[in-house]
Amino acid sequence: MWAASWDGEREMIRFPRRTVSAPRADSSFPPRILSSEIIADMAYLDENFFLHTGTARRLYHEVAAKQPIIDYHNHLSPKEIAEDKRWDNIADMWLGHDHYKWRLLRANGIGEERITGDASPRDKFQAFAETVPYTLRNPMHHWVHMELQRYFGIHTLLTPDTADEIWEKTNARLAEPGFSARALLEKFDVRVVGTTDDPADSLDDHHAIAAARVACKVVPTFRPDKAFQVDRPDLLNPWLDRLEAASGLSIHKLSDLLAALQKRHDDFHAAGARLSDHGLDRCPALECSDAEAAEIFDKARSGKAVSEEDKERFSFYLLVFTGQLDAARGWTKQLHLTPVRNTNSLMFQKLGPDAGFDTMGDTQQGKALYTFLDALAQRESLPKMVLYNMNPRDNYLFAAMTGAFQDGTVPGKIQFGSGWWFLDQKEGMEMQLNALSNCGLLSRFVGMLTDSRSFLSFPRHEYFRRILCNLIGNEAEKGELPDDFDTLSKLIADVCFHNANRHFGFNV
């Protein structure tokens, strides 16, 4: 993983206070030592951070750190991979699409000019350097300095006083051959990248990546949410025109739409897709007949907005339809539930979506979710699924829901997905792992993903792996899990890599 140095040597890992050798698989390192001794010896983000027992250290260094990465859900640009993009400066690479950082900049009193406005990249970087010291106890402080260490070999804390030095050093490294988009994937041993793609999007970049024989498998993910916009014909109809062009089919009535979606589903499969995705505040739960769906579509296609109730009926209809497509192909459907998007209407008008003005929803999820899952089960078309929640109150709800729809055909067929968005930090990950473990099979979990737009986000996998190893290692040393390193090693390796590889059929 990140243990590789930039000259290609993978044996030495450099940390702020000392240089240590990564333990080999047959190593007996580390000896059993007390947690208090470990904590006393730790520096900020050193080789053993988050690893509070000897067993946790051994599981991480000997097992987890050596696993390749499958990043099965993210928002990386296939165009940037196809073109093997390079970046002129760290601000463009680090700050250009990251609304996590934008939110913290605003919270620190930084004006929009230096966030999404016309300030120079150097000024935007300085604004971020002014903010980072105030992010203590926010996961951003960890992520920023992990990325500086793992990618650039920089162990200096980012502050206003160190901004010049770090600006110069990172930009110098970006000019080196190992910092193109494809090279970064290779450096972190990323075996699969699952981008997020609209059915109306061209797959030309994915075809170009495949033709270039890029070492990392880059596959599209089918996300047809714009087809649900029957309440906004001003948005739906231009999108349908794009879908016509992508599918080569005319779309006048509902049956045309379904044919076009199936055609694009087939095209995505041929391009390597094995997952679909939906981002919803909650699952729609109102049944809808073929005739009702056709009537709703006709109204929207003619330019007339439909009611909220009709939108929910139509969304349910399409969600069931795409679920049947997924099941027929052996795909996995992802449901990202609970976000409330674009809550700040003034800033949405100024900046548009994905600018950091979303929040955690409090919609009741249970009945709608099991109604949808049951509808597919009744049709014997329930695909493999990953369910993600954003509100931690729903952890046990989602974890328990997965168990109600397992059918014995696939291990871990219905998954409780990793901590997502506001929950993809230490506490959120631990809560998800505990709920999953208590209600299901942690050993069958498909593990972490970045959900990121940045090529600098792959240390998030390391972050998760350390948390996982610490959880398992601590419980083993307390006698709550077997003191059997082989058994624990299999669980760690499976969750970090092998389960996702098998479950999604990537075969890398």
Image (tube, rainbow, N blue to C red):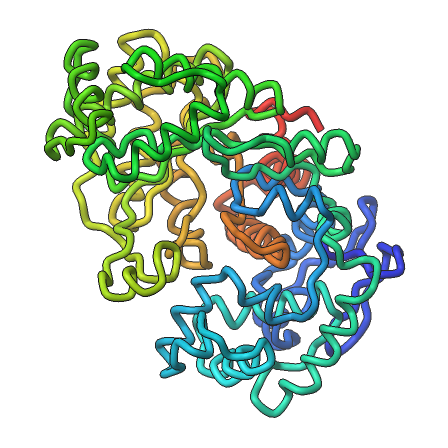
Q: Where residue 140 sits in the image (x, y, percent)? A: 49, 68
Picture residue at 76% right of the left edge, 47% below the top: 186
The number of callouts visible is 0
In the displayed structure, 54 sits above or below 20; it is above
* Of the pair 446 and 110, the residue shown nearer to us: 110
Quarter where residue 423 is shown = bottom left
Question: Looking at this rendering, what residue extends furthest in the bottom direction?
Answer: 161
Picture residue at 26% right of the left edge, 37% below the top: 397
* Of the pair 259 and 284, the residue shown nearer to us: 259
Judged left or right of residue 218, residue 365 is left
Picture residue at 28% right of the left edge, 52% below the top: 341
* Of the pair 442 and 164, the residue shown nearer to us: 164
Residue 88 appears in the rendering: yes
Quarter where residue 35 is shown = bottom right
Judged left or right of residue 306, residue 261 is right
Q: Where residue 499 sits in the image (x, y, percent)? A: 58, 30
Q: Where residue 138 sits in the image (x, y, percent)? A: 44, 70
Quarter where residue 231 is shown = top left
In the displayed structure, 132 sits above or below 408; it is below
In the displayed structure, 294 sits above or below 66; it is above
Picture residue at 15% right of the left edge, 23% below the top: 286
Residue 477 appears in the rendering: no
Judged left or right of residue 367, residue 11 is right
Judged left or right of residue 109, residue 173 is right
Q: Where residue 330 sits in the image (x, y, percent)? A: 50, 15
* Of the pair 150 and 313, the residue shown nearer to us: 313
Which part of the image, by quadrant, shows the C terminus? top right
